[in-house]
Amino acid sequence: MPRIKKRLSRQYSCKETRRVVSRIETFPNELVSEVLARVAASSVIDIINAKSSCKTFKEIGEDSHVYHHVSLDKLCTDSWKPLSEEQHAFLNKCWKSENPELLYRQAVVDYFNGVDLESACNQLHKAMKSSHIGALYVTCIILILNDDDKFKDKGIEIISNMQKSASMRRKLISHRKNLLESLRRMWVKNPILKQQRIFCKTPHRNRWRSGWRDMDAKLQCQACCVDREISAICGFFN
């Protein structure tokens, strides 16, 4: 009797699975692609599991829209350890799909290694068009350290506005940390990070030099906001 129940349970489960898959096949490919893209943005492990669950997911999961949104949090692309062929193939698909995280990571390597500054800026621009906050943050740092006052002022304005929002400040903490970790793993050749500057000329400057207990407290002074970010990034190399 238990064997019969187990067999019936297995048959019922198989029928239910086939029924779900058949329903999925009736959905427009664009809708399935959008769902898989959101899964991919959440976790690369989840999208791998989804693609292995049925033929439909496997086929549509290869869409460039999915690779454009896939999360790379679990994959370190700038370590000294060589990547496997499978990882290379995966990253090539992400690159062709203009995955903003991969564009951002490559831009950081190219810019701060001094390899191809123009290409790095183009990659940052593409990543920003996809609302990548890290790309916006790095672009602001580059603009602020630029010798042209026009670009400098624009970078100061953007990053100080970002600091005014509590939710954005939390994101800046994360992206600042990620950038520093990437720079520590790199051989930084671009001298821009060794040219630390002080922007605040008011008494706030003395307060900054003595340090704050809360590195990410809300500041009213734009120049102090900039000094804090530049000191956090450039201070590591000075």
Image: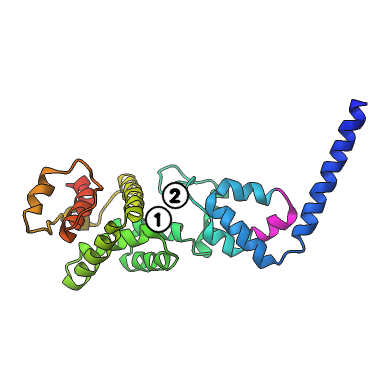
Residue matched to label 1: 105
At 17% across and 43% down in the image, what residue appears?
212
- In the image, residue 236 lies in the stretch drawn in magenta: no
Instruction: Locate residue 154, reporting x and y percent.
Output: 24, 69
Q: Residue furthest top?
A: 1
| 156 relative to 193, above or below | below
Whether residue 115 is visible here, answered yes or no, is no
Q: Percent from the top left, x then y, of residue 186?
A: 32, 48
Mark 2 is surrounded, within 10 Å at the Cα level, by few (under 14), some (14 to 19) or many (20 or more) other residues, namely some
Q: How many marks?
A: 2
* Residue 77: numbered disc: 2
| 65 or 159, nearer to the observer | 159
Q: Are marks 2 and 1 in contact (CB under 8 Å)?
A: yes
Across and down, in percent, residue 43 comes to 54, 48
The disc labelled 1 sits on which kind of residue?
Arg
Magenta region: 53-61
Q: Secondary structure at mark 2?
A: loop
